[in-house]
Image: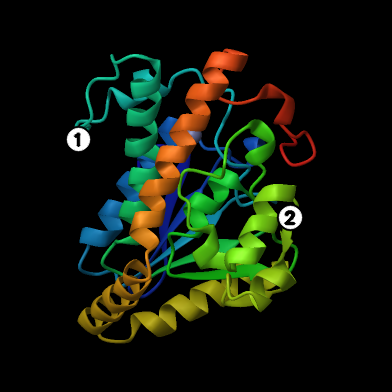
Amino acid sequence: MSTDPLILSDRPADRVARIVLNRPAKRNAQNTRLLLALDEAFREAARDDTVSVIVLAAAGPDFSAGHDLAESEQEAVLATRPSRVWSAGTGGAAERIMAYEREVYLGLSEQWRNLPKPTIAAVQGRCIAGGLMLAWPCDLIVASDDAVFVDNTVGMGIPGCEYFVHPFEVGVRKAKEMLFTGDPISADDALRLGMVNRLVPAARLESEVVALAARIATRPLLALRLAKQAVNAAADAAGRSSVLETAFGLHQLAHSHNLAVHGQVIDPAGVDARVRRP
Ligand code: ZN
């Protein structure tokens, strides 16, 4: 079990592990500590043979407000990760940003997407930018009918969050609209677009997700693993992996540009108080 209070773990049903983002006072904004603890919890559930399905949920009214833009300890926290592979964070500015984001943002999201067990995200309230990077890697998404999905990064001078699968999640045209405008995608629209599997009233989100997970968990684990791998292969054959890499390079160009022009990796004018409420 995770020992970091930012992440809680329990077993709400037979063969079901549930991992809960537990930073509700910050709307589950993701700092490095939270993301590394989340990764540890995912890995633990993945290697536990008594677990067939992993649920990712969040405490409080919002799933996640995204990356914690106020964090100042990224490198110090990442330095504690024994499996760190991309330098020690001592490169120049552009390299340091790229290395951190490849390992912690893109790297972890992609690793969770490829976990060899079914995963289900339970999303309520706001799921903003980095929040998408937790929900989208999951195999299924069940949302409460008050959920909204937002990528507001263009306003901050960034062409989308680091896990760039928007066209695969909502379609090409809607992906452009969500990025160009920064407007939320409602739960109803998310269902219609196939971005979420089911909508439920907020009060029933937890029970419905656990029931769905428990039902899937009765089925043969190897077949579940292989079915997941086959569907993931279809998305990758459709270009998902190369889009991720292309978009990540463009994303890093934008960070370098912002650093040169604004002295920081994002355009501060675009930090939107409406969606980043404290
Ligand atoms: Zn970034």
The answer to whether one can see residue 130 in this image is yes
Name the spot of residue 213 as percent of width and height, x first. Answer: 44, 76
Name the spot of residue 83 as percent of width and height, x first. Answer: 19, 35
Q: Which mark is residue 83?
A: 1
Front label number (2 vs 1): 2
Disc nearer the start of the sequence (2/1): 1
Give above or below for 174 relative to 155: below
Q: Residue at x 59, y 23 (%)?
A: 70
Quick one: SS at disc 1? Answer: loop
Q: Residue at x 58, y 76 (%)?
A: 194
- Provide the residue designation for mark 2: 184
Q: Residue at x 31, y 87 (%)?
A: 219
Residues packed near mark 2 inside 10 Å, few (<14), some (14 to 19) or many (20 plus): many
Instruction: Tell me the quarter of the picture where residue 99 sits.
Output: top left
Taking the view exactly as shown, the residue that stands out farthest to the right is 274
**160 left or right of 268?**
left
Q: Nearer the viewer, residue 165 or 205?
A: 165
Quick one: SS at disc 2? Answer: loop
Q: Residue at x 48, y 37 (%)?
A: 251
Please state the total of marks drawn on the protein image.
2
The C terminus is located in which quarter? top right
Q: Are marks 2 and 1 in contact (CB under 8 Å)?
A: no
Name the spot of residue 135 as percent of width and height, x first. Answer: 51, 58
Q: Which mark is residue 145?
A: none
Name the spot of residue 180 as percent of width and height, x first. Answer: 70, 49
**132 left or right of 105?**
right
Instruction: Tell me the distance, in whole angstroms, between the alpha carbons under discs 2 and 1.
Output: 36 Å
At label 2, which amino acid type do we have? Pro
Give above or below for 28 relative to 157: below
At label 1, which amino acid type do we have? Ser
